[in-house]
Amino acid sequence: MMLARAAENIYWMSRYLERAESTARLVNAASQVLLDLPRGASFGWDVLIKVVGLDKEFHEAYAEANEDNILRFLISDLGNAGSIYSCIARARENSRILREVLPARAWERINSLYLFVRNELGGSLGATQRYKLLDEVIARRQALIGLLSDCMSHDLAYQFLTLGCYTERTDMTTRIVDINAAVLMPRHQVPEDPSLGLLWTGVLTSLHASQMYRRHVSVHLRSAEVLGFLLRDPHFPRTVAYSLNKLESTLVQLPHHAAPLKVLRTAQRRVDTMRLDNLSPALRHEYLDAIQTDLVRLHDSVTREYFRCREVAPAPRHAVAA
Amino acid sequence: MNIGIDNYPCQATYDELIDRDGAVRPAAKAMMDHLTGLGLAEIHARRAAVESAILNMGIAFTVYSEGENIDRAWPFDIVPRVMAASEWLRVERGLKQRLAALNMFINDLYNEQRVIRDGILPAGILAGSKNFRPQCVGMKPPFGAWANICGTDLVRDADGTIYVLEDNLRVPSGVSYMLANRLLMKRMFPELFKVCAIQPVDAYSTRLYETLAALSPRTGERPVIVVLTPGIFNSAYYEHSYLAQQMGAVLVEGRDLVVGDDECVYMGTIDGPRRVDVIYRRVDDEFLDPEVFRADSELGVAGLMRAWRAGKVGIANAPGAGVADDKVVYTFVPQLIRYYLDQEPILPNVPSYLCMRQEDRDYVLANLDALVVKPANESGGYGMLIGPRASAAERAACAERIRADPRNYMAQPTLMLSTAPTLVGDSLAPRHLDLRPFILQSEKMYVTTGGLTRVALREGSLVVNSSQGGGSKDTWIVEDPT
């Protein structure tokens, strides 16, 4: 038995936590990659705000797109609803009303993660310190996931946790893969340009996927292969295919799942049938954009199906007795 | 350096742990020996650890201040308040006796009103009661129990007598802090639990569940129990979620519930409406049902009273139970115990003056500087006048209020509340405290082992309410030393 309002809360809590961790990984990966870039490289920190899709919001709030401002915006700016601090603060607010649903320790962990972020991530951070602190955010969030996986019944509440996590994750992976759209490639650059290789390194690192890519695919970073791995590999937990499969196996455990499942299958077919060889950046962007639209539709469908029934007066005559 | 008790002032009033000669009372000896044996640095380290645990565990209460809600960490003192089991046993019997009589009284008021016909309670008191709900007349909740959960405040005077200060029969809070305090002590001072024979407190959640389950209108299956909270901005929200968590109940808000045409209560789940059997409501009467009480309430559920009256849902505490939670009715409790149970009260009331009586009123008005004046229906220490501490202007204003509405005021002598050693800086200092045990009644009765000890952290202060600078201590009932 799962209260609709609680289900919505746990779904969002899970999305916020996933987003916070993804952003932390993204910033740390970018910090590494940018160090290796030759002078006059065609991309910089501003790529990050394009990847997370907050270009417009950033420029409304800040005059200059420099490293300091961009990192502040992504890490500690409470005015940015997608900053790490905002996400964790919102996850904490959501979990406050979930204390009877989540294992007791989980609330404690989320709360202490919040206190950590509040106390440590404010202000301007040096690069070394920043790397360490964001790594700590990632580690704490991973510990939390482990705790939930191990100490919580894999019941309805857990299914909504999984839905939130993998919906957010698929979205973020497609955005990161789409990084080329955010980078203005000079026309003369050939596809196997070395700085493109660096870019793919950054993409894989930000998904903690470098090692597994090398192990299972290749030590060389070729666009089609990286793309194929991140979209279609069924075994690495941050690929689009893996996440969509996870969403599918989660959805089928929920009651009346026909509508959201149909939307999900559309996305799965799209990924399966995509042609990856010699894909132009423009077409690739179009594909990835279409997947993101599928995810929005999935979210809407889940919302309609599960979170909104409290807004409709029930017809008690047909009510199911508990 | 250690925290010693050699210079501890123990003459002013009764101290819970130290006797008048400066010796530690037998029940507390093992604990005090251990604490004073720890170095000062160790004590401070443990205290810092407790504070960080409180922060991380999110044990907080919410205060409404300047238009926004702020979560304040729960102020906790590491020195426990200790009571011998033999003394507690008597208190426990007294508490059960008292709640049994109060429930018979409430049931009587809403039904035959024998207590008024027999001249025990003046009819005028009922007429002037703000918490009497005509909508509840004729109801007979299961087991005759209206107040299923009661928090009774006890204080000890200078001579060592334990008095009942008030009975909280509406939506008493604090029990989660009692449970959390014990958790903190176990985490930070595990070794103390080996040297002292401390009775456990954690049965409460299970007993509460049983108390509520017994109110279910449906039998034979596991009842669906919900905790109804006003929401995240309520000062006791932490407690609501904590109790739901401990009982495996669902924490709901009014907007999650709806009453169907069949007069059953349903909650909106992801799979459609599900019937609810028992509601542990932490919402005041006035806000429970906009059909019957305040029409502007968004915290309640329209039709809830219909469902309850039709016997389709159990509600704890029953609507209307607050009629006995009135500081004027309080003064009659000893007579009520004699009347309904034909027993002598085990726990005495604090001597009280009822301003509605001419003679008492004259006395109160003439002695405002020595008395504590309380309005009949406020809680949390609001609207109270502590005569000896008040200014002449405050006393004059209070006298005005009494003359305008005598039924609404009662007064008591200023008790010299007992103290217990409390860690202040680098040493132990006496601080005043009270005790709020919780009593449950439906099919069976249950009393918490001890209760929540609240302590006034400011030197000399007698106000223990958390909203007004109070803190708390773990409360130990220990086996009597042989």
Image: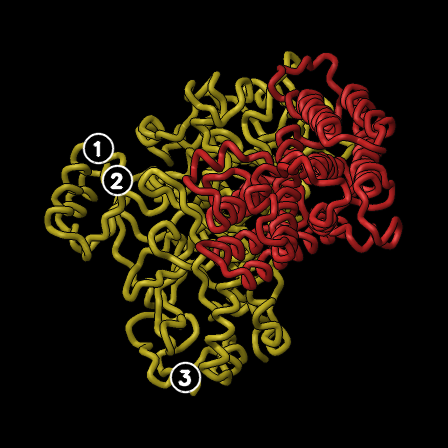
Chain colours: A red, B yellow
The residue identified by callout 2 is B409
| Residue A279 in picture, x, y percent from top left | 80, 31
Percent of width and height locating residue A11 = 66, 35
**Which sits earlier in the primary sequence, circle 3 or circle 1?**
3
What secondary structure is found at the residue carrying circle 2?
Answer: strand
**What is the chain letter for disc 2?**
B
Instruction: Tell me the quarter of the image containing the C terminus of chain B.
Output: bottom right
Measured in 3D between alpha carbons, the distance from the residue under mark 3 to the one under mark 1, in whole angstroms, is 51 Å
Q: Chain of mark 1?
A: B
The amino acid sitting under disc 3 is: Gly
Residue farthest along the bottom direction in this orientation: B1
Find out whether the residues at labels 2 and 1 contact each other: C-beta distance under 8 Å.
Answer: yes
Instruction: Look at label 1 and name its amino acid.
Output: Asp
**Crowd tier of the residue under label 2, counting other residues whose Cα lies within 10 Å: few below 14, some 14–19, many 20 or above:** many
Q: Is residue B212 above or below residue B272?
A: below
Q: Are marks 3 and 1 on the same chain?
A: yes
From the image, tell me which residue sits under label 3: B4
